[in-house]
Image (cartoon, rainbow, N blue to C red):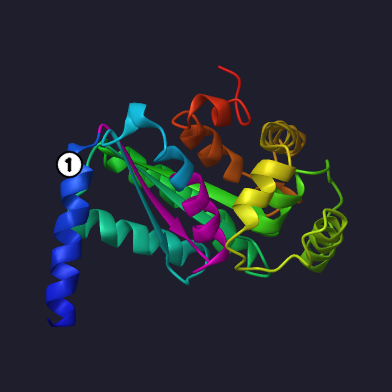
Amino acid sequence: MSSDSSKHKMKKRVIGRYKSAENRYFVFCEGERTEPQYFEGLKKEIEKNPLYRGRIFIEIEGVGAETVKVLEVAERKVSELKLNNTQVWCIYDKDSFPDERFNKVTEIAKNLSNNNQNVKYNVGWSNQCIEYWFILHFSFYDVNNDRKYYMQFLDNKFKELGIGKYRKNNTETFEVLQSMGNPKQAISWAKQRLNKCSGLTDSQSAPATKVHELVEELARFLPEDLRNKYITD
């Protein structure tokens, strides 16, 4: 079977599941592994909830592109698949990318949402990186250090928990954060940091993250025992 034929069949399967679902999410991640693997962990937990079996569609894609380019990939996919009644989320880091490009994504996403009432574009940035969101599962952290210190923090925490070093692209990171960290507290602290950054641009908001907004949105579909770890109904 040719690769084009395989892609066509996969696309048909995706669209079939997509059309039958009531709640639809496409998540486009800057990284190709760390962020997608985290959200795949959340997706797998949601799929255990029989109440939403077949009623929710979550597609996660690691695009290997930065800031504005993540949004461009999302926009192309919306057009290609003719998506509607869908939430599109772009997950990306500030890292060392120029402030202008980082700030521009939020503006473009708002304009796209205004121009297409059937698709809502959302941004889930982290400044400086996704590891800041991970840190908040263990501690309130509000020092604008270089991202290498975020890695060191997680490295020390993981060793303290007896699970070895923190590694990017670790398929177990989601489970560690959920079982050994405090997702509900992480959401609360993420909101607290954003409030402190009120009036600042995205690039000036450091450290801060909006990843929790997607996590909180999707956590509504988790089985009850796990949902209580994230949100209070």
- Residue 110, relative to residue 163: is it above or below? above
Residue that carries the numbered disc 1 in the rendered image: 19
Q: How many neighbours does mark 1 have within 10 angstroms: few (below 14), some (14-19), or many (20 or more)?
A: some
Residue 176 x/y as whole percent: 68, 51
* Total numbered labels placed on residues in the image: 1
At a point 60% along the width and 40% down the height, the residue shown is 212
SS category of the residue bearing label 1? helix
Q: Amino acid at mark 1?
A: Lys
At a point 68% along the width and 42% down the height, the residue shown is 179
Could you tell whether 14 is left or right of 198 in the image?
left
Q: Quadrant of residue 14?
A: bottom left
Q: Nearer the viewer, residue 213 or 163?
A: 163
- Residue 211, relative to residue 101: is it above or below? above
- Residue 133, relative to residue 162: is it above or below? above
Could you tell whether 86 is left or right of 135 in the image?
left
148 falls in the magenta region: no
Point out the stretch of residues depicted in magenta: 22-43
Residue 132 x/y as whole percent: 72, 53
Residue 70 x/y as whole percent: 44, 63
At a point 47% along the width and 63% down the height, the residue shown is 68
Q: Is residue 202 visible to the viewer in this orientation of the structure? A: no
33 falls in the magenta region: yes
